[in-house]
Amino acid sequence: MASENNGAFIRNIAEVPWREFPNHFGGALSKPLVMPETAGSRHIDYRISMYQPMAYVARHKHLVQEQIYHVLEGEGLMEIAGRNHVVRKHDFIFLPPGVEHAISNSGLVDLVFLVITSPVTDEERPV
């Protein structure tokens, strides 16, 4: 990893181990690329996720966090406020705070997507 003493860095995705975060099931894995624990970020949580067929995250909502999902590969179902939507390569989803949602891989190959979340914790109050 190339790192500057000002906190900036360049890192390869292969350096970051896969994790199964709480309430993620069946091979719903993520690489926490930029978050407080991995990069010291204060405002952004940025990760890439790979869900095997049938993997999913439990339905949930955020109090103050906004999220963007950007599908890179595969297809699945994104549940937003009780309605299922097919999502596939090049689709992106914006989720404001308070909207109940879940995503699952209903396809035949791995579902790969980016997740960008701000602020980094759901306890923070918006500025």
Image (spheres, rainbow, N blue to C red):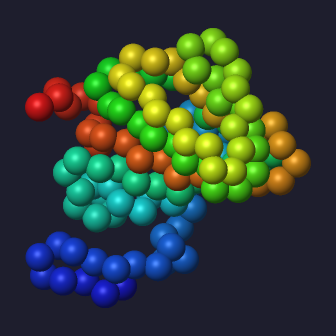
Query: Is 109 drawn above or below residue 57 in the view shown?
Result: below
Q: Is residue 61 left or right of residue 50?
A: left
- Residue 50 visible from this viewpoint: no
Q: How many numbered marks are there?
A: 0
Image location of residue 21, percent across then percent down: 52, 45
Image location of residue 33, percent across then percent down: 42, 63
Query: Is 30 drawn above or below residue 80 in the view shown?
Result: below
Image location of residue 24, percent across then percent down: 61, 38
Residue in the image at 54% along x and 77% along y: 14
Kindly indicate the quadrant of the structure image that contains residue 112: bottom right
- Between residues 89 and 6, which one lies in front from this camera angle? 89
Residue in the image at 57% along x and 33% along y: 23
- Between residues 35 and 22, which one lies in front from this camera angle? 35
Query: Is 50 drawn above or below residue 100 in the view shown?
Result: below
Residue reaching furthest to the front: 90
Image location of residue 86, percent across then percent down: 74, 32
Q: State which quarter of the image contains the N terminus.
A: bottom left
